[in-house]
Image (tube, rainbow, N blue to C red):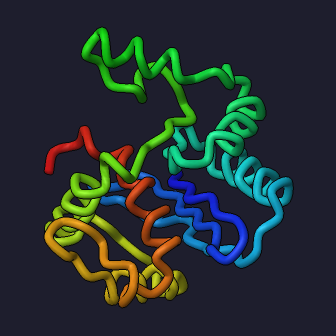
Amino acid sequence: MGVDPAWGSSAFGIVVTQWVDEHIQILHAEVYQRPDYNEMLNVVSKLIKKSNINKIYIDGANPSFIRSLKIQMDERPDYEWLIEIAKKMKREVWEYMDVIPVHFSTEHKDMLSHCKIKLEKELVAINPRFDKLITALRTAVDNEGTLDKEPTSYDDIFDAYRLALEFYHHKSD
């Protein structure tokens, strides 16, 4: 699952995927306008249970939502020390936690490149009912490795999609 929490003028994006027959299938791709914090926590929790999700990649710029989600998942909300341990041990953060903060400020270029590779290799299956995600992918503009959000429609769902694809980063590109 990829979660791009947002409040105020921005939308909240959620994308759920699964790996089937050597392809990434999109199970859920939605944006929520003017979301309520508790309502979105409930939506994410229901999707986790419904789809039996084991890893949630979430925009690291929203620590309060990350902590709330970690509490709901019975995971320690004080996650920063685990990130430091992973770095010191030269391990991946996902080995230590299920709700995984990802910081676009440092990871955005790698995430965009990874997304592009998966699409070019036709490893992603998207049902036409996820029209907002399809529109986001069609309008996405790569500006020297950075997503240009101005011409990109539904950039929040695109960010949630990029976060969801982080789960497949260890699978062969």
Residue located 58% across and 67% down the image: 13
Residue 86: x and y in percent read 37, 17
Residue located at (57% from left, 35% from top)? 99
Q: Residue 109 at what x, y percent from top left?
A: 23, 57
The picture places residue 106, in percent across and down from the top left corner, at 31, 46
Foreground: 4 or 19? Answer: 4
Q: In the picture shown, does residue 154 fall above or below 122?
A: below
Q: Nearer the viewer, residue 78 or 69?
A: 78
Identify the residue at image location x=16%, y=45%. 172
For the residue pair 104 and 128, the one nearer the viewer reads as 104
How many dots with numbers? 0
The residue at 44%/54% (across/down) is: 164
Q: Is residue 140 above or below residue 173?
A: below
Residue 139: percent from left, percent from top: 33, 89
Q: Against 127, is 89 above or below?
A: above
